[in-house]
Amino acid sequence: MKIYTKTGDKGETSLLGGTRVHKSHLRIDAYGTIDELNAQMGLLRDQEVNQKRTEKLYAIQDRLFVIGALLATDPEFKTLKLPTLKKEDVTFLEGEIDAMESGLPELKNFIIPGGHPVVSYAHIARTVCRRAERSIVLLADSSPVDPLITEYVNRLSDYLFVLGRQLAKELAVNEVTWRPEK
């Protein structure tokens, strides 16, 4: 089977279930941004400092594939057997956030992203995650979306922010806080 089908050459693609939609459709944008986020998560997971959390980051990538499949499915097509997202997936992220935050100094100012490429990778993933969340919320305004998807993606952006802080600590990078000019 060839990777190219030529069926999208005129700007349309198929949802799971077969419905053809324009590639600019909100549903395509939402799951496409989740796909982009998953690639960013892979880059983050591949960093040497993350060897101890490879399995956890892989589990998050697995959940992002589930979310992508759910978003890529025509909501009218109800006979397709799909993997599910569970409340426990959100709880997992919350537990990871709590564990990391317990060893970090209290946050009193905004942090300027950067200081080390790996810290920046975490913040880039966070901003892609926020964009995915905005796309999903926009889609949900006009089409059914499981609210757990939005909850998970929202919590994931929090996780990525705290992970960036944790990575800065592990790499002995000073967090630069934003101090607005007066």
Image (cartoon, helix red, strand yellow):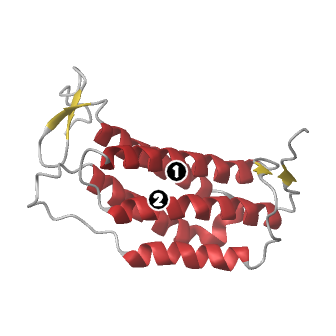
**Mark pair 2, 1: CA separation:** 7 Å
- Name the residue rendered at 52%, 51% in the picture: 129
Instruction: Classify mark 1: residues with Cα within 10 Å, few (<14), some (14-19) or many (20+).
Output: many
- Residue 45 found in image quarter: bottom right
**Disc marking residue 153:** 2
Q: Do the residues labelled 2 and 1 touch (CB within 8 Å)?
A: yes
For label 1, the residue is 129
Please report the residue visible at 61 percent of the width from the left and 55 percent of the height from the top.
44
- Judged from this view, the residue extending furthest toward the right is 182
Which amino acid type is shown beneath numbered disc 2? Val
In the displayed structure image, the side of residue 57 where residue 87 appears, left or right: left
Q: Residues within 10 Å of mark 2 (few under 14, many from 20)?
A: many
Above or below residue 56? Residue 141 is above
Say above or below: 100 vs 134.
Answer: below
- What secondary structure is marked by label 1? helix
Identify the image quadrant of the N terminus: top left
Rendering coords of residue 179 (x, y %)? 87, 46
| Position of the C terminus by quadrant | top right
